[in-house]
């Protein structure tokens, strides 16, 4: 029965979407995708190197790229660089997983139930507007200054994008798809898993990408206060000691790690769309 339902749902999607969809242009060549993505970073590096080498900007304000590399080597040799990278990545991934799970549950409730939407949506919308640093004193009071406080703060940041995108997408699922599922006797969770969630896969992935980016933002907020390890700690400690080279290093590492984890979500997106798209 599930196979027949899947076939019918795909046929309905084809009628609704594919029949009038224009042919997609050919995908850009892989080499151009890679080189095009590197073009702007290379240009920024060239401008940065020129500005620092010519003395256009003083060294205490703009360290040279080689000095940033030397700072990275120094921290790596002392075993601090990879420790900070590992602890920050661990915090982000754990908080992202917890927050995304909470966002999926709440988003499904609000998106599928009018009663839940009336009861929960206004409160969640108000909480979403609270700045990240505003949560820190309360979390320190209840959870202390150790790992749970940091992970929960990141989870809070991750939950809202997933909740918002999923709740909105579920409200706009094609009614014909839902009717087809009900015609095969699906109700509740089976209907959600078989029909509704596959129909909103692109929205879910978009929510996860936003949640991951938000997780890195909340990580810095979590580590700037009450932390002795991590890239956020490296930022604040370097600022206190006037190590501008390490500040640049921490910012670059955050950018690289954020982009790397986002690329992993992109791989997940392609697999999900291949299966349900």
Image (spheres, grey):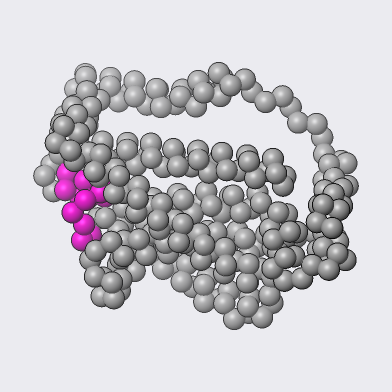
* Image x and y of residue 141, in percent: 25, 75
In the image, which residues are magenta?
225-238
> Does residue 71 appear in this view?
no
Relative to 224, residue 51 above or below: above
* Image x and y of residue 94, in percent: 40, 56
* Image x and y of residue 143, in percent: 28, 72
Q: Nearer the viewer, residue 242 or 86?
A: 86
* Image x and y of residue 73, in percent: 19, 29
Residue farthest to the left, as pictured: 241
Q: Is residue 171 magenta?
A: no
Q: Is residue 237 magenta?
A: yes
Corner quadrant of residue 225: bottom left
At x 59%, y 49%, the residue is 205
At x 61%, y 54%, the residue is 204
Q: Nearer the viewer, residue 208 or 182?
A: 182
Relative to 54, residue 62 above or below: below
């Amino acid at each position: 029965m599930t196979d027949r339902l899947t076939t019918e749902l795909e046929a309905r999607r084809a009628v609704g979407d594919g029949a009038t969809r224009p042919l997609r242009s050919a995908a850009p060549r892989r080499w151009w995708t890679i080189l095009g993505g590197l073009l702007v970073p290379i240009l920024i590096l060239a401008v940065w190197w020129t500005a620092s080498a010519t003395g256009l900007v003083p060294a205490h304000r703009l360290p040279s790229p080689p000095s940033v590399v030397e700072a990275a080597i120094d921290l790596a040799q002392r075993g601090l660089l990879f420790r900070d990278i590992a602890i920050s990545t661990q915090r982000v991934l754990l908080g992202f997983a917890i927050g995304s799970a909470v966002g999926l549950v709440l988003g499904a409730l609000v998106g599928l139930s009018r009663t839940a939407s009336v009861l929960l949506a206004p409160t969640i919308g108000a909480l979403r507007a609270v700045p990240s640093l505003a949560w820190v004193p309360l979390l320190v009071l209840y959870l202390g200054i150790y790992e749970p406080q940091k992970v929960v703060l990141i989870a809070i940041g991750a939950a809202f994008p997933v909740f918002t995108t999923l709740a909105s997408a579920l409200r706009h699922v094609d009614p014909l798809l839902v009717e087809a599922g009900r015609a095969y006797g699906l109700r509740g969770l089976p209907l959600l898993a078989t029909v509704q969630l596959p129909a909103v896969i692109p929205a879910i992935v978009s929510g996860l990408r936003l949640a991951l980016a938000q997780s890195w933002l909340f990580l810095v907020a979590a580590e700037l206060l009450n932390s002795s390890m991590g890239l956020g700690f490296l930022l604040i400690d370097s600022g206190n000691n006037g190590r501008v080279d390490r500040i640049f290093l921490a910012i670059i590492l955050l950018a690289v790690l954020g982009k790397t984890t986002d690329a992993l979500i992109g791989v997940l997106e392609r697999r999900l769309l291949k299966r349900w798209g």
